[in-house]
Image: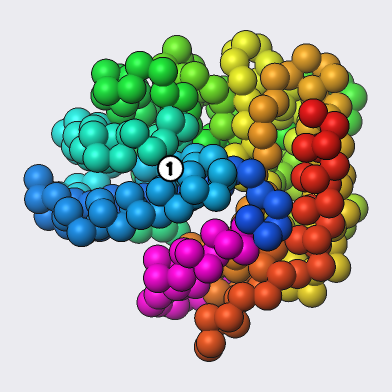
Amino acid sequence: MQRPLEMRSGKAASHYDLWQEDFALAKQMGHTAHRFSIEWSRIEPKRSQWDKQALAHYREVLTELNKLNIVPFVTLHHFTDPQWFSDSGGWLRPQAPAEFARYAKVVVEHLGDLVSNWVTINEPVLLSTMSYWQGRWPPQQKGFLKFNKATRHLAKAHRRAYREIHSLQPHAQVGAAKHMISYVPTKDGWHHALICKAYNWWFNDRFMKLIWPKLDYVGVNYYFQRKVGLKMKPPFIQQQDDGDKESDLGWKIKPEGLFNVLNGVKKYKLPVYVTENGLADEKDALRADFIRDHLRAVERAQREGVDVRGYFHWSLLDNYEWDLGFGPRFGLAEVDYKTMKRKMRPSAHVYKAIIEAANRSE
């Protein structure tokens, strides 16, 4: 599936308008927790101007989730920035962390009585990589120094937001949703193991060290296992995604990699949540087994002593999948983008049965 050059999101899946219907669907599917994001640009459309109507909307959303006994996990930043923030330089500006922390404080002041589980930033290293190194995402700039500066500012933004949230909610649970890749050597040998360890530090551990110890839990987003090694001729570093089956996007599927990354974060000695895990599968041919196999990896990690407290499948609905547009279908529920009607896929019933069985065993 090719990445569209331009595809406007419009109302996307229209969740902002149909949230009550969507939460009823989540309840029907047996979900006991729901992760969603608050849109910064709605809350602060202009610098230091706060939209009371937008805050009231999210208050309604959270009230409904609590009414349904669905625990909300609220993400404060999921890739998008207010226009004024981007126009003034985005995450390259030294003021960016303070501006994000100020926004977080306002949100918690208005909504903190309805939610106690916060995700500050979703996939910060992927954001800085795609936006400031590869230049695929807005603001589409390229340069290692810019990437490094943005990464450090995102880490500082998390730390400052963590302090602001805890100043208002001492018992809140605050973390970040860190995209983790399982790196394994291409073959035996110390040099292959060494380059594997370097990749793991660079992508998985470096950001965690930058925000440590301002974490109450570790959020893990998992999609890939990647084989890496060294060659004797250019480009010297060999890497390829690992897996026997693949999604509609050509992403290889490797449930074992989820165990590897969960086992890798055990060293932080914190509760762990799988904050994202899913696949593009329009025909719903692979999703049921995908869920079963990845949850078995979670159970294996728990047996190995990883304190995994929850799992969020990506996603409840088909969605506008950022730079991939409307093509990929990640939803447990299919969305007809012409009518905005939702329809549960068969895999959603499988997932529901697993949830109900887990609840009975508690």
Residue drawn 40% across the image and 54% down it: 61
Quadrant of the rendered image containing residue 76: top left
Along the viewing direction, whichever of 266 and 342 lies nearer the viewer: 342
Classify the position of the N terminus by image quarter.
bottom right
Number of callouts = 1
Task: Name the foreground residue: 345 vs 239.
Answer: 345
Whether residue 256 is visible here, answered yes or no, is no
Give the residue number, with chain letter if any, for mark 1.
75
Query: What percent of the width, then of the height, locates residue 352?
Result: 78, 53
- For residue 51, say whether it is visible: yes
Q: With 14 as the anchor, is 290 left or right in this view? A: right
Left or right: 252, with 319 as reference point: right
Residue closest to the far left = 48
Residue 220's x, y, as percent? 61, 34
When the figure is inspected, residue 267 is found, relative to residue 350, above or below; the finding is above
Up/down of 356 relative to 160, above or below: below
Callout 1: 10 Å neighbours few (<14), some, many (20+)? many
The residues colored magenta run 1-26
Residue at image coords 68%, 60% = 28
Residue 207 percent location from the top left of the image: 48, 26
In the image, residue 354 lies at what x, y percent?
83, 46
Q: Residue furthest front?
A: 67
Q: Is residue 15 magenta?
A: yes
> Which residue is depicted at the point 54% across and 22% down?
217
Image quadrant for the C terminus? top right
- Amino acid on which the number 1 mark rests in the picture: Thr
Q: Look at the picture and state if 28 lies above or below 343.
A: above
- Tell whether 78 sits left or right of 350: left
Residue at the location (78% across, 14% down)? Answer: 305
Q: Is residue 306 magenta?
A: no
Here the colouring is rainbow
